[in-house]
Image (cartoon, helix red, strand yellow):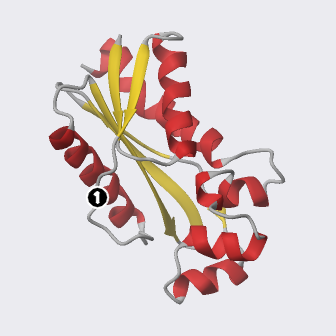
Amino acid sequence: MHHVVAATTNPAKIRAILHAFNEIYGAGACEVESVDVESGVPEQPLGNEETRSGARNRVLNARHAKPDADFWVAIEAGIDEGSTFSWVVIENNQQRGEARSATLPLPEVILNKVRAGEALGPAMSQYTGIDEIGRKEGAIGVFTAGKLTRASVYHQAVILALSPFHNPVYR
């Protein structure tokens, strides 16, 4: 059984990680443990590099917190060029896999709040009336009419970031 450390306490992110690992390694082949670690970037990362750095920092901090795991996984959501997206970083003791998720363009009413210093989750909660929306369907669920959710978009990115770990051509 693979011991996977998720560098998050966010249920949407944990669901995506567990679902992706189960698809790649088989149902029940992985146990996911959640740890609350710092990203080293602002609560609302802006730009591709800041967001990617946040995910990499979370993996590093998760490795320090739980050094005996088989995999460490971080998902950092950010905003870049008016859209929300995330970086997924996965490491084991031999290698790293990284993938950027699909992007969702955000409406100006939300972007204006983010530009004023508010994080996307609280801005969306205020806009929708859904408490802690970032731990649920997120802006993605709202603006895609439920066709996608944070977890479903994260799931795809985790699958992509896992590619180097189960395909020998990457080694």
- In this figure, what is the number of numbered marks? 1
Question: Could you say which quadrant of the image residue 127 lies in?
Answer: bottom right
- Residue at the image point whose x is 28% and y is 58% from the top: 38
Image x and y of residue 170, in percent? 30, 22
Residue bearing the label numbered 1: 38
Can I make out residue 167 in this image? Answer: no
Screen quadrant of the N terminus: top left
Vertical placement of residue 46 versus 69, above or below: below
Image x and y of residue 147, in percent? 80, 44
The residue lying toward the viewer, choosing from 62 and 165, is 62
Question: Could you say which quadrant of the image residue 114 lies in?
Answer: bottom right
The residue lying toward the viewer, choosing from 61 and 156, is 61
- Residue at the image point whose x is 67% and y is 78% from the top: 110
- Residue at the image point whose x is 53% and y is 86% from the top: 115
Density class for disc 1 (Cα within 10 Å; few <14, some 14-19, many ≥20) is some
Vertical placement of residue 101 versus 33, above or below: below
The answer to whether 126 appears left or right of 6 in the picture is right
The answer to whether 171 appears left or right of 136 in the picture is left
The amino acid on which the numbered mark 1 sits, given as a three-letter code, is Glu
Image x and y of residue 37, in percent? 29, 52
Screen quadrant of the C terminus: top left
Vertical placement of residue 169 versus 132, above or below: above
Vertical placement of residue 5 versus 49, above or below: above
Residue pushed farthest bottom? Answer: 116
The residue lying toward the viewer, choosing from 10 and 120, is 10
